[in-house]
Image: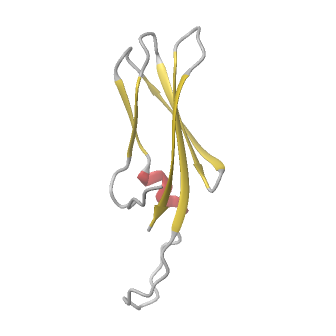
Amino acid sequence: MAAIALRSPQYKSLTAGAASVYALCTIKIGGVLKYTLRKEAAPSQVVVFEIAELCRDFLDAGFDGDYSPATPVQTLTIETEINSYDSSTPPSITASTQAITI
């Protein structure tokens, strides 16, 4: 699993199917579903979701007056799954899991 920084945008994408009309992106943090995002999709086009801003909500941000590098590193396990849907068939699915180190 890759470590990524949540201060930078983190994009998740899927190429929608030929008959897709929308895509759903689910975000689990620590194995618990936290967000389900829906975006309209044009057939066979790339649908992009940006997840970093939402995931930052689960960091304990604080400053104790000490700039030393001995500050503990925060790690979140973030799982994303993107599904594209048309009106009549089961979704096509792509999924990824990343451990996010801050």
Which color scheme does this rendered protein use?
Answer: secondary structure
What residue is at 33 percent from the left and 57 percent from the top? 8
Q: Position of residue 1 (x, y in %)?
A: 48, 55
Residue at left 38%, top 14%? Answer: 43
With 6 as the anchor, is 89 left or right in this view? right
Q: Is residue 32 above or below residue 42?
A: below
Indicate whether 36 appears above or below 46. below
Counting from the top left corner in percent of width and height, residue 87 is at: 56, 10
Q: Residue furthest front?
A: 1
Give the residue drawn at x 51%, y 59%: 57
Residue 42 image point, x, y percent: 37, 17
- Residue situated in front as seen by the camera: 37 or 13: 13
The residue lying at 49 percent from left, 26 percent from top is 23
- Whether residue 30 sits left or right of residue 48 in the image: it is right
Q: Say which quadrant the C terminus sits in.
A: bottom left
Vertical arrangement, residue 61 with respect to residue 86, above or below: below
Could you tell me how many numbered marks the image carries?
A: 0
Question: Could you tell me residue 89's position as x and y percent?
Answer: 58, 11
The answer to which image quadrant residue 35 occupies is: top right
Residue furthest out toward the right: 32
- Whether 95 is drawn above or below 59: the answer is above
